[in-house]
Image (cartoon, rainbow, N blue to C red):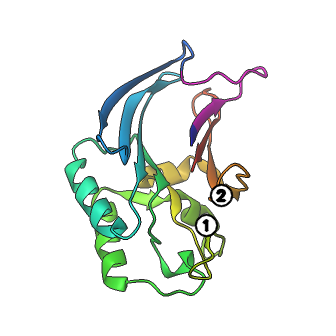
């Protein structure tokens, strides 16, 4: 789920609002990613929503991030179920494939992308998914943004999503130059 809200005199316009222009740029046939570009409150924004297939998540992420690197810029926010822990802190048993994590994070670093939730919450351990089969909690749902967005991100939290087996991550971006606060929820 992706939702962009703005608070302005009690209204909550959606992506179809006249103040928003969003265009579909790319998507794959399988429904694993969709890239939208546009503007909200006269600020450019790109949203890349990714669902990385379980079992091949790190390979998929590396391929798609490389494939889409020309589309990813300082206005891009990546949201979605990555099916992949980006850090040992993101898994309750801390068992991760360090080589794969390092490779994915190296690509994210080259793109200047950071985990906005982790930047706000430091070493805090909180998770978005529980696997009964493995008996582990993981934070595999993420909101990633350009490193400069960390200055605008005033809040990042994991919120219960009763309609899904994954909890959602919600970030709040500070208003700037008279613009309204933006809330982005990814799951």
Quadrant in which the N terminus appears: top right
Nearest to the observer: residue 119 or residue 51: 51
Q: Is 41 colored magenta in this rendering? A: no
Depicted 55 relative to depicted 32: above or below: below
Instruction: Say which residue label 1 marks.
Output: 129
On the rendered structure, is 52 left or right of 138?
A: left
Q: Residues within 10 Å of mark 2 (few under 14, many from 20)?
A: many
- Residues marked 2 and 1 touching at CB (< 8 Å): yes
Quadrant of the image occupied by residue 34:
top left
Question: What percent of the width, then of the height, locates residue 158?
Answer: 67, 58
Give the magenta-colored segment's residue range. Answer: 3-15
Nearest to the observer: residue 92 or residue 112: 92
Q: Residue at x 25, y 47 (%)?
A: 68
Question: What percent of the width, then of the height, locates residue 168?
Answer: 63, 53
Instruction: Say which residue label 2 marks.
Output: 167
Nearest to the observer: residue 120 or residue 107: 107
């Amino acid at each position: 789920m992706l939702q962009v809200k703005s608070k302005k005199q009690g209204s909550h316009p959606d992506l179809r609002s006249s103040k928003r222009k969003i265009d579909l740029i790319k998507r794959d046939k399988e429904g694993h990613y969709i890239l939208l570009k546009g503007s909200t409150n006269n600020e450019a924004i790109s949203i890349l929503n990714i669902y990385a297939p379980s079992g091949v998540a790190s390979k998929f992420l590396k391929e798609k991030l490389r494939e889409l690197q020309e589309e990813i810029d300082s206005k891009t926010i990546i949201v979605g179920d990555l099916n992949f822990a980006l850090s040992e802190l993101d898994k309750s048993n801390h068992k991760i494939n360090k080589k794969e994590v390092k490779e994915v994070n190296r690509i994210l670093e080259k793109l200047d992308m950071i985990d906005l939730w982790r930047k706000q919450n430091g070493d805090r351990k909180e998770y978005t998914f529980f696997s009964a089969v493995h008996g582990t909690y993981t934070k595999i749902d993420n909101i990633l943004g350009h490193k400069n967005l960390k200055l605008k991100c005033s809040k990042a939290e994991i919120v219960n999503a009763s309609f899904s087996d994954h909890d959602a991550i919600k970030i709040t971006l500070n208003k700037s130059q008279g613009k309204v606060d933006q809330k982005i929820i990814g799951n």
